Amino acid sequence: MNPRRRSRWSPPPPARYAFHTNVPADAATVRARTHSLPGRVQPLDDHTSTLHLAANNPHHIAEQLLTIDLGPDDTIHNTPELTRYLEKLGRRLLCAAHALTTQADNDAGTYGTGDETNDYGADDH
């Protein structure tokens, strides 16, 4: 091979953030819910799989985590920087949920009789 014609490709550097856990779901379900590449999800048995996520943006990992139920705490491993990001994001989500719940409680007390249905035709209770 001509030395001047060699490929300049080199493997990408490791991702800044990483997350690894066991998930109480089969590998096909985890792949479908997280949209992970097949190599990132490995079956342990018919009902449990391991999930390996990596990204340079922690938001990408958080998006994938929102789609699955995680396994026991002792099976979760990640980079410390990701921990801080997920805690901050979790607080934001809890604040938003609390604000919406408070608003809904206030609206129901002010406007509702308790017999209403929501926009989708389902009972609010």
Image (cartoon, rainbow, N blue to C red):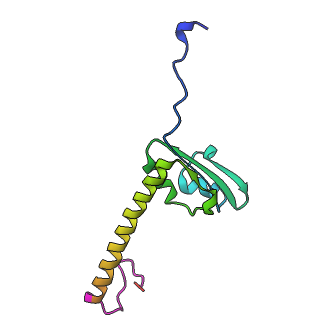
Q: Is residue 65 above or below residue 111?
A: above
As drawn, is 110 to the left or to the right of 23?
left
User: Residue 108 placed where, x, y %?
Assistant: 31, 86
| Residue furthest to the right | 45
From which residue to which does the magenta span run? Answer: 110-123
Residue at figure coordinates x 33%, y 74% from the top left: 100
Q: Is residue 108 above or below residue 35?
A: below
Residue at figure coordinates x 52%, y 8% from the top left: 4
| Residue furthest to the left | 110
Quadrant location of residue 88?
Answer: bottom left
User: Residue 30 placed where, x, y %?
Assistant: 60, 56
User: Residue 22 placed where, x, y %?
Assistant: 64, 56
User: Residue 68 placed where, x, y %?
Assistant: 55, 61
Quadrant location of residue 23?
Answer: bottom right
**Quadrant location of the N terminus in the rendered image:** top right
Residue at figure coordinates x 48%, y 50% from the top left: 82
User: Any magenta on residue 106?
Assistant: no
Q: Total marks drawn?
A: 0
**Quadrant location of the C terminus in the rendered image:** bottom left
Closer to the camera, 17 or 43? 17
Closer to the camera, 43 or 90? 90
Residue at figure coordinates x 45%, y 56% from the top left: 86
Q: Is residue 14 above or below residue 104?
A: above
As drawn, is 94 to the left or to the right of 53?
left
Q: Main secondary structure of the magenta part?
A: loop
Q: Is residue 81 above or below residue 105?
A: above
